[in-house]
Amino acid sequence: MSMTSRVLLALVLGAVAGLSLAYWDTATALLVADVVHPIGRLWLNALQMTVVPLVAALVVIGVNAASDAAASGRTARLAITVFVVLLVLSSTFTAVAAPALLSLIPRDPGLVDAFRAAISVPDAQMSVPANFGEWFATLIPSNAIAAAAASAMLPLVVFSLFVGFALSYVAPERRSMLLEFTHGVADTMIVIVRWVLWAASVGVFALVLAVCARVGFGMLAALGWYILLLCALYIAVTLMLYVVAMVVAREDVRRFAVAILPAQAIAASTQSSLASLPAMVDSARMRLGYPLRVTSLVLPMAVSLFRITSPVQYLGVATFIAWMYGVELGPMQLAVAVGLAAVISMGSVGLPGQVSFMATNLPVTQSLGLPVEPLGILLAVDTIPDVFSTVANVTGQLTATGIVAKRGAQDPRSNGDVVAVAAAGDRA
């Protein structure tokens, strides 16, 4: 049985057990919840301990991968620019749309209080700077190690960006050595995360049982709203990409939609951009007529570096948790989350699904001062929205290719662009 199947089964069994106990006897349900909750908390702690080194390593690796690609030629630089712009736009859209959509959902204060008590964490405490100047002064840490120890994700990411960009100016042999070390740190953390995720069924079962025993059917309703929120955001981003293709890449919408449909179908069935790459190449070359020198360069880069729904997920998850806890996210906090989500997504595309969910959602959630305990439960239902996520990713990768083909391929300086980028899928 696959890990995804085991986690979903654990969620179902935990929900059934918790709801049955709550229906049978409330006192017994609370007693059992008190016993099993520490197991789920221990599992989450094991995941959290890898976040700081993993995020720092991923940012450094992502910056260097992007700079290497951009140094390969004008078309590659244009592609990187398109990726970054689309990531920032998707982040900004989610920062506005997710709170707006959640405001339409009636929120039961009793459910919120029960949920907060069920996962046994203090009230979410937002660390809001007194003013913009105070916030701006904290962007660069005076002590990077102290920032890492305090899990101050934004200063840590800024420091990692400095390291990543500085490495491009280091002698090639030393740069290679440092990058190998950084890759080793990232790979080691991923191995640890895989070990922890091996026990995900136990952790998810304990978390869901404890929450359902204390909250009841309200927990299932909350998960339903979460799934609908992410699916709606992914579908909205996909539809907006058609508008981008029409306006920026000057594509006929009907022709574009028909041409990319086979790649979207494979994306939905496999939940992997890498598995969809041959179909994307066929759509771009044979159906849309993009030049070979553009498709052979941009599509592998896109699969390796660009997943437009990553920031959508990070911000969607964070705003949902904030909604559940009754925390009002201000413009400054959302702006910070937008930038952080765009940066982290560039280094996380090659991670497997469950690894990616925890390693990348934790930093954004922590940076907003929100509790991370709900992530263990949300991980279990991520498979359902992931179908729409992968379709949006493939649509975004083909849209970016179209923009580069129409906007930059005519320049004769781009004829000699060559890049070698290792392709990696967004789902294992």
Image (cartoon, rainbow, N blue to C red):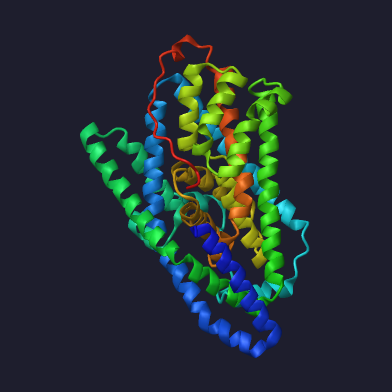
Please say if 148 is above or below 79. Answer: below
Res. 395 in view? no
In the foreground, 172 or 36 = 36
Left or right, 109 with respect to 364, comes to right
Please say if 193 is above or below 80. Answer: below
Residue at 70 percent across and 54 percent down: it is 228
Please say if 224 is above or below 133. Answer: below
| Position of residue 246 measured from the top left corner of the image (x, y, whole percent) | 69, 24
Residue at 64 percent across and 74 percent down: it is 16
Outermost residue toward the front? Answer: 1
Residue 151: image quadrant is bottom left
Please say if 100 is above or below 423. Answer: below
Res. 10 in view? yes
Total labels drawn: 0
Residue 19: image quadrant is bottom right
Residue 111: image quadrant is bottom right
Residue at 65 percent across and 63 percent down: it is 327
In the foreground, 125 or 311 = 311
| Position of residue 414 measured from the top left corner of the image (x, y, whole percent) | 45, 15
| Position of residue 157 measured from the top left corner of the image (x, y, whole percent) | 43, 49
| Position of residue 323 measured from the top left corner of the image (x, y, whole percent) | 67, 62
Left or right, 385 with respect to 192, comes to right
